[in-house]
Image (tube, helix red, strand yellow):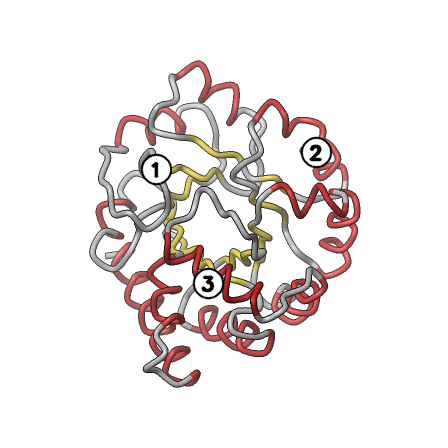
Amino acid sequence: MKQLVAYITAGFPDVNFTIDAAAALKNAGADIIELGVPFSDPMADGAVIEEANLKALHEGFKVERIFEISKQIAPEISTYWMGYFNPFYHKGIDYFAAKAREYGVNGFIIPDLPFEEAAPYKHLLEGMGLNLIDFIAPTHPKERIIKIVKNSLGFIYLVAYAGITGSGAEEDLSQIAQDIKNCTDTPVFVGFGVNEKSAKAKAKGVDGVIVGSAFIKILLNEDLTKTQKIDKIALLARNIKEIINE
């Protein structure tokens, strides 16, 4: 069965809501929670996720809150911390790694940490039983794909297009997905621009999809109550899970 990775921004709009949202997504069929660490300049993300990041920071988000959230959700569903390198570097990867192990988090997704520069951190994390997720872009040649994926753990993040999350751009991923599959047995998940309309096409030839902006759009809708927001993201997760497994 193809898997669904659901991104939510930690602490948006608050800690308890994030915990409840993660539980609802799990019950709706999400297999992995990608818990976003709010950052002021999320360069790989579009306006939707950037707005959620900034709102969380405006409300006083502190790194300790991601630990509080993870303590509740990681024992129930596979959880990864998604964030930009600056916050991890500031406190130290070893600090976050120790906390990840303490709370049962599976690993890290750091989109602005290049493969070569990630090597020492990857070694550290893997030595602690944690995964540092590798990224593949549609522009990568076969030689680089082989280099990146040969030691991949957890899953491989296949970026659906060159750009930012949520932009809705389209690329034919069939060949690059096959190239990756020829090199590794590690699951391949497609992210960027995945929503109810695009999920079926993007899931072809891979093991699952990563959905972020589609959920965050709902959470940003101030016309909805918190209960309505949770109900709507759960319904969306259920629908996407069904679509990708039709």
Numbered label attached to residue 121: 2
Q: Earlier in the sequence, mark 1 or mark 3?
A: 3
Numbered label attached to residue 163: 1
For residue 98, side relative to residue 165 (left or right): right
Discs 2/3, front? 3
For residue 197, side relative to residue 162 (left or right): left
The image position of residue 218, as x and y in percent, is: 35, 70
- Residue at left offset 24%, top offset 35%: 171
Q: Which residue appears farthest toward the front when viewing the image?
A: 58
- Residue at left offset 26%, top offset 32%: 174
Pointer 1 with pointer 3, Cβ within 8 A: no
Secondary structure of residue under mark 3: helix
- Residue at left offset 74%, top offset 47%: 97
Secondary structure of residue under mark 1: loop
CA neighbours of label 2 inside 10 A, class few (<14), some (14 to 19), many (20+):
some
Discs 2/1, front? 1
The image position of residue 26, as x and y in percent, is: 48, 69
185 in relation to 139, above or below = below
Numbered label attached to residue 4: none
Q: Earlier in the sequence, mark 2 or mark 3?
A: 3
